[in-house]
Amino acid sequence: MIEATHLATFLCPACGGHSFETILDIPPVPVNCSVLWPDRNSARAARRAGIQLICCQDCALIFNATFDSKLVEYDGRYDNSLDFSPSFREYCEALTGRLIQSYDLRKKRIAEIGSGKGHFLRLLCEAGANEGIGFDPSHAPETGRVGEGSVTLVQDLFRGDFGGQHPELVCFRHVLEHFDDPADFIRGLREALRGANDSVIYCEVPNAACVFGGASIWDLAYPHVCYFAAPALQRLFASNGFRTLAIGTSCADQYLYIEAALGTDPLTEPRIEKEGTLALAGNFRRRFMKTVAWWGDFLNEALLEGRRLALWGCGARGVTFLNVVPGGGRIEYVCDINPHKQGAFVPGTGQRILSPEALKEAAVDGVVIPNPVYKSEIERSLRNLGISAEVITGLGSQRFVQHGSNSYAHSSGA
Ligand SMILES: [Zn+2]
C-alpha cells in the first residue's frame, strides 16, 4: 500500500491532476494473469502483487497507484485471445464492417497497435482490400495476403513509425489501459501522425463504468493500470491534440470506444460529465466487498453440499475471481474454449485448464461464469454438450447502474 504522503506527490497519468480519492486495495493477485503455466507448482508460485485503485478527481480516471511495469511480461507465453468465442467473432466482424463503412476504408492503409495474432487486422484488410501493418511484441513476424488485401505483423512495440506512409486508420483495442503513461502514448501518436489530419484513430478499452458500476466487476487485473470511463478517455484525447469524431460503448456496455482525428473543434467537442464516474468509484469499495462476500458464501455452501462446480472462462476475469474470492482455489474444474489454454495451469490457484468437453466427464452441476456477457453462448455450449448444469453469474448480488444509450456523442464531421 502506498502512503498518503506519497499520494500527495502523485500526478494523474492521464490529465496530470493531483487530487485523488482512494477506492480500494485488492489483495495480491497474479501479475501476469494471461500467462499460461506448464505445471501446477509454477502456476501456484506465479508472482503476485496488490492493486491499489485510486480515482483522479479531475478527469475521473481510476488507476492502480502501485503498478510496476517491470513485473508485467508480454512474451510468447501471453495469450488473451478471445477469437475462439463465436459471439466475440461476431462482434469483431460487425465492428470492422462499421469502421469500413464510416470511414470508407477501401484500398487504404491500416495500422493496429497491439495486434496480437492479427485477427482483427485481417478482418479489416480482407473486407476492404486494405493494406495492414500490426505491431505486437508477443507475436512472431508474418506477412501474407488476405483476400485482395495484405497484412504484415511486426514483432515489436509501436515505436512511432508506421513504416512509410501515414495510415488512414490507426486502431488499438485493449491496449491503452496497459500503459502507466497513457498521455505519453497519445502524444507519441500525435507526433507519428503529424500532418495526417484525416487519419482516424479507433481506440477501445474496457469501460470503467461497467467495471465499477455494471457487470464487469471481475475485470480488475494487474496488467490493467488505467480504467477509463468516457470522461477520462475523451479528455485524454482532447487535451493531447485530437478531436472526437465519435465516443460510445459496445458489447453490452463492456467496451468503451473513441474515434478521433488530429485537431481541435471546441464547438462539437462533447463534454461528458465526470460526476457519474466519480460516484461509481466512491461506491465501489462497498459493492466489491459485498460481491466477494456473496461469492465466498455461495462457494462455501456449494462445496459443503458436495456440488461439483466448474468455472468457465479463464481470462483475466476468471483469474481474478479465482484468486480473490475465498474458496476460489477449491473450484475443482476450470475450462476455457481457447485450445491454447487447455492443459495449462491457472496462475495463483493452480487448477489445470480443461476443454468444455471435459466438464461432461466430470459431471459438473454448476458452472460459474465471471463474464456474464457470454452467458447465452455458454448455455448453448452446455446444451450442445448434453450437460445440464446450473449457470451462475452472481448478478443478483450486484446492484447495477443502467445506461440508457450506448452512444455518448457523434460529431457530424466524421
Ligand atoms: Zn486525471
Image (cartoon, rainbow, N blue to C red):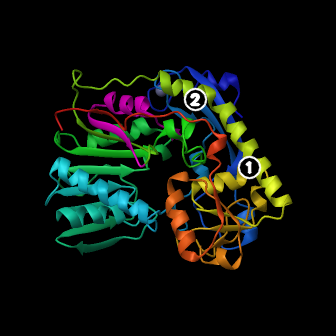
Residue 253 colored in magenta in the image: no
Dot 2 amino acid type: Ala
Q: Earlier in the sequence, mark 2 or mark 1?
A: 2
Give the vertical position of 88 relative to 63 (above or below): below
SS assignment at label 1: loop
The residue shown at (77%, 54%) is 299
Task: Please provide percent x and percent y for residue 318.
Answer: 62, 56
Give the vertical position of 132 relative to 278 (above or below): below
Crowding near pointer 1: few (<14 within 10 Å), some, many (20+)? some
Task: Please provide percent x and percent y for residue 70.
Answer: 59, 50
The residue shown at (36%, 61%) is 90
Note whether residue 340 is visible: no
Mark 2 to mark 1 CA distance (whole Å):
21 Å
The answer to the question of whether label 2 and label 1 lie on touching residues, with beta carbons closer than 8 A, is no
Q: Which residue is mark 1?
A: 325
Task: Please provide percent x and percent y for residue 74.
Answer: 52, 59
- Please report the bounds of the magenta region as a residue range: 226-251
Left or right side of 393 for 205:
left
Left or right side of 113 for 208:
right
The residue shown at (72%, 59%) is 348
Residue 382 disc label: none
Could you tell me which quadrant the C terminus lies in? top left
Q: Nearer the viewer, residue 175 or 346?
A: 346
Q: Which residue is mark 2?
A: 281
Residue 243 colored in magenta in the image: yes
The residue shown at (16%, 42%) is 198
Note whether residue 110 is visible: yes
